[in-house]
Amino acid sequence: MTPTLVYQSVVSIFFLHSLVIFASYENNKEIYIVHLGLPDENQFFSNFEDLHDWHHSFLPSNTDNSSSSRMVYSYRNVLNGFAAMLTPEEVTSLQDKEGIISVRPRQLLDAQTTHSTNFLGLHQNLGFWEKSNYGKGMIIGVLDSGITPDHPSFHDEGVAPPPARWKGKCEFNFTACNNKLIGARYFHEFGNGTPLDENGHGTHTSSTAAGNFVDGANFLGLASGTASGMAPLAHVAMYKVCNASLICSESDILAAIDAAIEDGVDVLSFSIGKNSTNFWSEVVALGGFTAMQKGILVSCSAGNAGPIPGSVFNGAPWLLTVGASTTDRKLRATIRLGDGKEINGESAFQPKDFSKTPLPLIFPGTNISDPTAAFCNAESLKNIDVKGKVVLCISGGKITRIGKGNFVKDAGGAGMILMNSEPLGFTILADPHVLPAAHVSYADGLKIKAYINSTPKPQATFLFKGTIFGDDHAPAVAGFSGRGPNLASPGILKPDIIGPGVNILAAWPKSIENNTDTKSTFNLLSGTSMSCPHVSGIATLVKSAHPDWSPAAIKSAIMTTADLVNLGEKPIEDERGVPADFFATGAGHVNPLRASDPGLIYDIQPEDYVPYLCGLNYSNRAVSMFVLRKVNCSSAIPEAELNYPSFSIGLGLEAQTYTRTVTNVGEAVLSYVVEIVPPQGVDVRVDPPLLNFSELNQKKTYQVTFSRSSTSTINATFVQGYLRWTSSKHFVRSPIVVTLE
């Protein structure tokens, strides 16, 4: 697929309030992003003073608006082009001009911890945290909804002044930045004249990545402890590109990446994206490519559209794509049924004085004349006597989880049991409900429904047990976490990694209050928006420990050292409670301690992506949009030939062979032997099976041949396994997914 001159596609929607995609402007104008071809250098320097002047030359001049007022952004790094206010008629005229590659309306995208540091093995004054100096001197750029500069998570005690390379700005209209929060910028469309966070999302993600240590953090008295980000002594730079409703403008995103490159960030973290079947129409992929060229690692969320196959977002191989997992911390709210059986759920509202006396239990979903009643909407509850009763509600139905509790409370209900819908399975979210409540899994919800149907007078009560640790099923893949296959490039396995993203405690702009006497400026949120900054911070620690490593090298270290088992030493499970496949976990669950010392890395240079992009059947023009120079796709490679730390191939009857090159970053003299766990029905041969290294940074190449087994017949769409290089001190594992054709 290649870009046409004018195109428009539909943005994937995460939130119900985001259905209006394009904003209206006076005189029928919208913001369009214009991609330009490369200018002739002789003609450029003879006719234009600078890049900005050249961009202005494409804008209409015979209108009531000057070209300067039309120009929204003149991009300097992320692409050859600009963003401007144009009418549809002007777009039609513009597409005929020489030098135009594409013109398209900018789209609106959606934005997708006291314990998670300990859960990931990061402890003060010990191990990797100490060796990486807590990220000291590194700069994390966060694209989000803004930041709350006076939150305790952004105090700068122990944080060094920013490095000399820092060129960023602090655009608050009051003194707000310090050695921790060294930059804060806002952009044209949704900045609202300030980098201040008007939602809370950006404050939460920034503190997750790099918040400083805060003692006594908690949420309504629960999940208490010392809060910090993954890289607590790193610097934070906020680029506000999303509004209070978490709608984010493409033109602002490109401008923010453009600025971050010039400002001097080391890592870019953003929980923004969309599902797509190509990369040249994705601003995250386009801008992220330029950032990668400049040595900046770009970490992105995998999206919240799971568990649907093919729902993963941000699938470009130069991006680090992060899915979401659970931790072993639970805010335990146990339901005791009338027959004495107890079922564990979670809730962030846990009243201390709730009576253990059983109450009547009802399920509105038994009203077959109202199929929406099971979701506990306000109208259906008006027709049911819920006063003084515990009400079982099913999650979903266009009503928020807390909203259901409001409806139950308003109708006189004494409590609520919130049952997952089937897609979320065992992924339970702890919310600050407005009445005594417990959120339970889909399987446990079915048990409660069966109990209700088994007796004429069902009863239930709640036992609130506070914060509990030690769930040996953790980590498990969250039901909402985006899944492969990667629609834009099936030969690249996505997501790359999973990390904590369920019930994550982090900074919040304002005090959270409920029916308790406790207030908190921390909040519990769930989503790949939460897992992404975890891994962004971990990548920052790795870069701090290895400042000369490329983004691909850091990404390889994180992927090849990931965990495949949970705390119970069993395979990581998905939301159904069964072993998760690699389309859900990617390489596995992030392990910061091992990522700092991977032994071998799979490195990729920016130029290596050119034959890969050509192999996707992109035109020369499309590929040039990434590399910002003229390209001739004379040589192309299959997707799976890219030197990626994982394998994702489609296999028919013909054998396929791919090459990989590893670089020794462990001990100078060491040997690695290959171990293969082949996918069912697939023969995997590695040549050579032994790699002997005699010096640091030495490279070795091996080939992997995949073929269908002649002795096995299987009935499956895809199968999986892995290969692992093992030495006396390291293991370097690459997941394998084979789609059977």
Image (cartoon, rainbow, N blue to C red):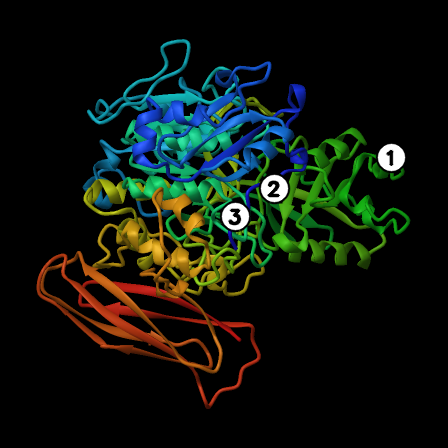
Amino acid type of the residue that numbered disc 1 sits on in the rendered structure: Lys
SS type, badge 2: loop
Q: Which residue is mark 2?
A: 8
Instruction: Pinpoint residue 662: horizontal percent, then vertical percent.
Output: 23, 62
Residue 417, picture quadrant:
top right
Q: Specify whether 14 is left or right of 591.
A: right
Query: Please, is residue 715 above or below residue 428 in the view?
Result: below
5 and 225: which one is in front?
A: 5
Circle 1 or circle 2, nearest the eye: 2
The residue shown at (59%, 42%) is 7
Is residue 465 or residue 196 the one in the foreground? 196
Judge from the rendering whether residue 682 lies leftward or rightward of residue 108; answer left or right. Answer: left
Disc 1 vs disc 2: Cβ atoms closer than 8 Å?
no
Tag 3, which secondary structure? loop
User: What amino acid is found at the position of numbered circle 3 in the picture?
Assistant: Pro
Q: Height in image: 557 above or below 133?
A: below
Q: Residues within 10 Å of mark 3 (few under 14, many from 20)?
A: some
Depicted 606 relative to depicted 54: above or below = below
Label 2 crowding class (10 Å Cα cut-off): few <14, some 14-19, many 20+?
few
Residue 221 seen in render: no
Q: Position of residue 168 (x, y in %)?
A: 31, 22
Q: Quadrant of residue 692?
A: bottom left
Q: Which residue is mark 1?
A: 382
Which residue matches tag 3? Answer: 3
User: Tag 1: Cα neighbours inside 10 Å, few (<14), some, or many (≥20)?
Assistant: some
Q: CA distance from mark 2 to mark 3?
A: 11 Å
Secondary-structure class at tag 1: helix
Give the residue type that dot 2 points to. Answer: Gln
